[in-house]
């Protein structure tokens, strides 16, 4: 695996080193020793699978508040998505800045999202699917979100939004009362 740190400290785009032959291919998607080299110490305790019927669908921007913050490792296994992360660390020089990367079944890239980041994505193809690994259990009382279209974030989505859950549309816009994590 090749770990490329993004402009948001602690967040990495991970490229796989597949081995291929006439049968197909093989790639390791997690190795504890390799992830320890970027400072990863927590155990992944939950894995989720998201599928999205329509391109243009947006999910996010989700995060959990303390003490339930989570690290996420995300990979697209079918189709393609524009993956977006936002730094919510109040003392970070990149507070409220975002980073985007295309994850696809074809490019086999993953993103490592540190604690205290919001995460979301937009399906770029019909029937896109993601696998998420989490270091914390989903905790409904700690579940929070940012608006996908918040002018303070200025996220440039690749396609016009076609489907967004009522919950994701209901998040408040960031104002001067938002202090981060």
Image: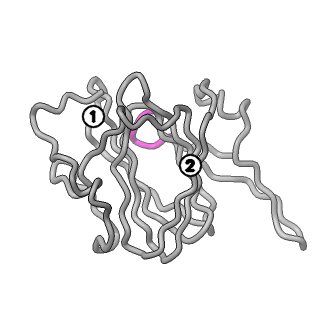
Q: CA distance from mark 1 to mark 2?
A: 24 Å
Rendering coords of residue 109 (x, y %): 59, 56
Rendering coords of residue 116 (x, y %): 38, 32
The part of the chain drawn in magenta is 5-9
Q: Residue at x 37, y 72 (%)?
A: 56
Q: Which residue is mark 2?
A: 132
Q: Residue at x 28, y 54 (%)?
A: 167
160 lies above or below 18: below
Q: Which residue is mark 1?
A: 95
| Label 1 Cα crowd, 10 Å radius (few <14 / some 14-19 / many 20+) | some
Which mark lies nearer to you, 1 or 2? 2
Residue lying furthest right in this view? Answer: 22
Which is more N-terminal, label 2 or label 1?
A: 1
- Figure quadrant of residue 40: top right
Please tell me whether residue 63 belongs to the stretch shown in magenta: no
Q: Residue at x 36, y 38 (%)?
A: 143
Rendering coords of residue 121 (x, y %): 41, 58
Q: Quadrant of the C terminus?
A: top left
Q: Is residue 160 left or right of residue 28?
A: left
Q: Is residue 90 left or right of residue 21?
A: left
Tell me, for residue 125, which label it has, or none: none
Q: Secondary structure at mark 2?
A: strand
Majority secondary structure of magenta residues: loop
Q: Secondary structure at mark 1?
A: loop
Q: Is residue 53 left or right of residue 66?
A: right
């Amino acid at each position: 695996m090749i770990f490329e740190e993004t402009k948001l400290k602690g967040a990495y785009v991970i490229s796989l080193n597949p081995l291929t032959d006439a049968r197909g291919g093989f790639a390791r998607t997690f190795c504890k020793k390799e992830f320890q080299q970027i400072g990863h110490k927590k155990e992944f305790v939950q894995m989720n699978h998201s599928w999205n019927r329509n391109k243009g669908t947006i999910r996010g921007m989700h995060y959990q508040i303390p003490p339930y913050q989570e690290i996420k490792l995300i990979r697209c296994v079918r189709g393609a998505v524009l993956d977006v992360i936002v730094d919510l660390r109040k003392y970070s020089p990149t507070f409220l800045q975002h980073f985007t990367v295309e994850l696809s079944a074809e490019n086999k890239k993953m993103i490592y999202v540190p604690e205290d980041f919001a995460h979301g994505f937009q399906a770029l193809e019909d029937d896109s699917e993601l696998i998420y690994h989490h270091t914390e259990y989903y905790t409904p009382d700690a579940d929070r979100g940012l608006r996908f279209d918040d002018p303070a974030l200025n996220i440039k989505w690749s396609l016009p939004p076609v489907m967004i859950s009522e919950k994701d549309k209901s998040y408040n816009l960031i104002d001067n009362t938002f202090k981060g994590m």
